[in-house]
Image (spheres, rainbow, N blue to C red):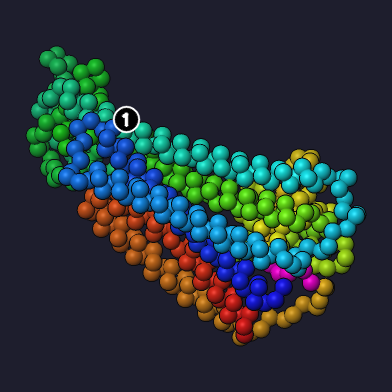
């Protein structure tokens, strides 16, 4: 494979990941817009402003169209890259009759890679359901507060204290009469409206006749904070799980197609974790030597199918399939259970004859450190700006712009970082 073909394959892979990241960002934006629309439609008393519903529908349609466009363009670059990497044998040696097929059913393991992709796709549905549950919970919280506002008993209470907390919600402590003979009750009400309160101020308190401890004011819904935190944690877990599941489903599908095209090659492999702990840690390396004496180094990809537990047995027998960034190492047995165990990986170099270790070039090391330093400065400035924008949006109480800015601002550095370091690697190769 020529250097030009290698760069073309890298370019197509970079565009694949860029369009995948775009599909995820636009998909999350569309889900957020849909969740906001459903929340508004399901919340009693919520009134859409003029043209608001039309704008939200158009935003959802636009996000959906952009997702489909990113998927289509990503598939196009996937096919172009597959055509390039399938034309060479720089990652795998030629097939031989002695490939250990009788020890492991390699055809069944190839089919199992497809099941892993389907499992990840199933997790996408699970995390989508989690996010739907979060929206349903928020709607239920709002509906409960509105129901209490309409049906609760209204009395005049008094503010006893105003408390501001650095690590939790601000509260006001009120005292209010209950019924004719039950005397007075005290309650801490979450203060999130921004309305000013002073000690001794007379305010309207609304409580549930069936449960007088359940209380709010006309301005403070006083939602259950435990449930609110559970929903927030569920939202964070849902977004993270959805993103990771989409990436896993796409990557396992690519690996299945790559192994289906190349088959498996037997090799001796050694798992080398990134120990001892130091800066710029990475996933374990997998040193592989094929039966024809050629060698290559792979790096385990981030996955639940980790390779660290397999570090204790050097030069163990395994099978390798796929090409370039879409490779799989198949071990006869896992560390904790018998039976074939697959580890996703990608090639750090092409298959080569054993060679003496080349000393590091000080000029290249200085160049790489300088580029890394500039990248860290740029990321620091990016997130500082993002935090400032989030603070402004929180101050202005713009919930949905805050959600969109938070999601897009957090995920955008992923494809940008990949493009940046790919160009740095290309520049190092040219030096």
Q: Nearer the viewer, residue 257 or 195?
A: 257
Pointer 1: what residue?
Answer: 140
Residue 135 screen position, x and y as percent: 36, 37
Residue 181, above or below 165: above
Task: Using residue 346 as the reference point, say whether residue 287 is left or right of it.
Answer: right
Q: Quadrant of the C terminus?
A: bottom right
Residue 41 screen position, x and y as percent: 27, 35
Residue 178 screen position, x and y as percent: 16, 20
Magenta stretch contains residue 108: no
Magenta highlight: main SS: loop
> Which residue does the image show at 14% across and 13% down from the upper left?
181
Residue 261, above or below 381: above
Task: Using residue 381 as the reference point, say whether residue 165 is left or right of it.
Answer: left
Residue 151, above or below 218: above
Q: Secondary structure at mark 1?
A: helix
Residue 7, above or below 347: below
> Which residue does the image show at 83% across and 68% down from the upper left?
294
Res 275 visible = no
> Which residue does the image show at 50% across and 39% down from the upper left?
125
Residue 211 screen position, x and y as percent: 25, 20
Q: Nearer the viewer, residue 63 or 152?
A: 63
Q: Quadrant of residue 95?
A: bottom right
**Which range is magenta?**
348-352
Q: Nearer the viewer, residue 66 or 108?
A: 66
């Amino acid at each position: 494979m020529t250097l030009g073909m290698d760069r073309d394959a890298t370019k197509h892979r970079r565009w694949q990941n860029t369009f995948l990241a775009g599909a995820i960002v636009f998909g999350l934006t569309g889900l957020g817009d849909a969740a906001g629309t459903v929340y508004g439609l399901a919340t009693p008393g919520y009134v859409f402003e003029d043209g608001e519903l039309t704008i939200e529908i158009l935003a959802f349609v636009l996000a959906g169209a952009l997702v489909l466009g990113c998927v289509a363009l990503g598939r196009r670059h996937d096919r172009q890259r597959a055509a390039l990497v399938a034309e060479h044998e720089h990652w795998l040696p030629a097939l031989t009759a002695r490939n250990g097929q009788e020890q492991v059913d390699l055809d069944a393991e190839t089919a199992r890679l497809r099941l892993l992709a389907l499992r990840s796709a199933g997790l996408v549905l699970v995390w989508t359901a989690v996010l739907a549950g979060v929206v349903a919970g928020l709607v239920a919280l709002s509906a409960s507060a509105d129901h209490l506002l309409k049906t609760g008993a209204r009395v005049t209470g008094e503010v006893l204290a105003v408390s501001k907390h650095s690590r939790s919600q601000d509260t006001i402590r009120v005292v209010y009469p209950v019924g004719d003979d039950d005397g007075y009750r005290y309650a801490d009400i979450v203060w999130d409206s921004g309305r000013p309160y002073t000690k001794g101020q007379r305010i309207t308190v609304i409580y549930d006749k069936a449960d007088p401890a359940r209380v709010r004011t006309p301005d403070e819904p006083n939602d259950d904070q435990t449930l609110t935190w559970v929903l927030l944690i569920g939202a964070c877990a849902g977004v993270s799980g959805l993103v990771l599941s989409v990436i896993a489903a796409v990557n396992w599908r690519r690996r299945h197609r790559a192994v289906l095209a190349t088959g498996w090659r037997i090799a001796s492999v050694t798992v080398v974790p990134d120990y001892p702990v130091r800066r710029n840690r990475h996933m374990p390396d997998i040193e592989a030597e094929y039966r024809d004496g050629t060698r290559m180094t792979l790096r385990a990809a981030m996955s639940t199918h980790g390779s660290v537990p397999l570090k204790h047995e050097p030069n163990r027998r395994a099978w390798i399939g796929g090409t370039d960034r879409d490779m799989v190492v198949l071990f006869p047995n896992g560390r904790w259970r018998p039976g074939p165990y697959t580890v996703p990986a990608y090639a750090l170099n092409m298959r080569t004859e054993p060679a003496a270790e080349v000393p590091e070039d000080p000029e290249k090391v200085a160049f790489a450190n300088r580029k890394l330093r500039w990248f860290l400065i740029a990321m620091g400035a990016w997130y500082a700006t993002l935090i400032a924008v989030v603070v402004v949006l929180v101050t202005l109480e713009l919930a949905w712009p805050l959600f969109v800015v938070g999601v897009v601002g957090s995920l955008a550095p992923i494809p940008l970082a990949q493009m940046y370091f790919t160009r740095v690697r290309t520049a190092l190769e040219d030096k």
